[in-house]
Amino acid sequence: MATTEAYMLQRDSQESKRLDTQHVFLCALSGGQLVHPSIPRKDIRTVADVATGTGVWLRDVAACAEFPAHANSKKNTFVGFDISPQQFPSMETVSANMKLVVHDITEPLPLEYHEKFDLVNVRLMSYAIKAADLDRVVWNVLQILRPGGFLQWQECDACDIWATPETPMTTASINYVISEKIARGLSPGIATSLLKMIQSYSTPIPDGQLNPISQSPQLIRITQLETVSTYNHNSPLVAAGKKPLILSVVAELLGAGLVRRKAAIGDSSTPTGEGETLLQESREIEELIEALKHGGHQIRENWEFEMTWIVARKAILVNKSDAWMSVKHPA
């Protein structure tokens, strides 16, 4: 059988619109914050967005007056990376100091980007990164972060979605999404693996130097770990938008599983017994998609999800004699 792509969503104009709508929703879920409140705005002048998609997060940061790194300053740099240019906006619509680069983040980035960025943003890679590639992805992201720079990473996985009351339809929908992730080599729960990976990296500290951020050999230290949930959220936008957003995303993810199964059914190398199972699963998935897409007003369950928000800071190595450096870059 042909190798199945990791990415579970589409790259068409309809999906681009959904991503932009999702961005507005996630900002509301995050308390209206594009960047975690713990990250000092005054130090952000170079910004990277990994898996940028339509570039909507990057464009909003560039336009935000609260950051010195706003689009009007030619000294500032905004770079979005994505494996595909299909959802990039027209360059006429972005600022002159914004650049969109086609790059597979499982591969090392060009040296021109190493230790360049004050802030690197990553969001919702759970449906795009194979479990076996996560280590390389995190390492590649850390390479472009300058010493003292901040990493912001937000993730929501299929296991972070739930519905009350739980029904056969809701259970089957989530289980099929999880099984599809596993079939594609994706992690069913990326946040835990991501946290362990970030905490595992260390850097040798030469004699006579120190890391004033944490006084430890950690290459990057988690400074904030937060969970934001749609449940009882005080934003009217979140309250009104969570159900249609979740239903549309789950339907799209189920669609990825349906496409893969139909391709396998049509593959002459698929064993007969497996093909019959895939056919039955395909019919069940089609019914679930139909219910989620067109029966939304009849769906009484309350759908919720939570998102893990990680903030980490890269180590700074300075001479022990340079006491002022510890003041300039406090923990």
Image: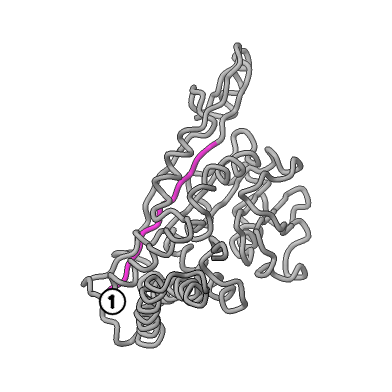
**Residue 116 shows up from this direction:** yes
Looking at the picture, tell me which residue is in the foreground, 276 or 55: 276
* Left or right of 52 in this view: 22: left
Residue holding disc 1: 169
Please say if 65 is above or below 253: above
Q: In the figure, residue 321 lies in which quadrant?
A: top right
Q: Residues within 10 Å of mark 1 (few under 14, many from 20)?
A: some
Residue type at mark 1: give it: Met
x%, y% of residue 71? Answer: 71, 57
Q: Residue at x 69, y 69 (%)?
A: 89
On-image quarter of the N terminus: bottom right
Q: Residue at x 39, y 78 (%)?
A: 279
**Residue 236 shows up from this direction:** no
For the stretch drawn in magenta, the main secondary structure is: strand
Looking at the picture, tell me which residue is in the foreground, 240 or 274: 274
Looking at the picture, tell me which residue is in the foreground, 95 or 204: 204
- Chosen colour scheme: one colour
Q: Which residues are magenta?
A: 301-313
Magenta stretch contains residue 22: no
x%, y% of residue 287? Answer: 36, 83
* Left or right of 259 in this view: 159: left
Q: In the figure, residue 230 lies in which quadrant?
A: bottom left
Please say if 84 is above or below 217: below
Q: Hey, which residue is sitting farthest left in the picture?
A: 165
Magenta stretch contains residue 308: yes
Disc 1 is placed on an element classified as helix
x%, y% of residue 214? Answer: 48, 26
x%, y% of residue 266? Answer: 51, 77
* Left or right of 207 in this view: 178: left
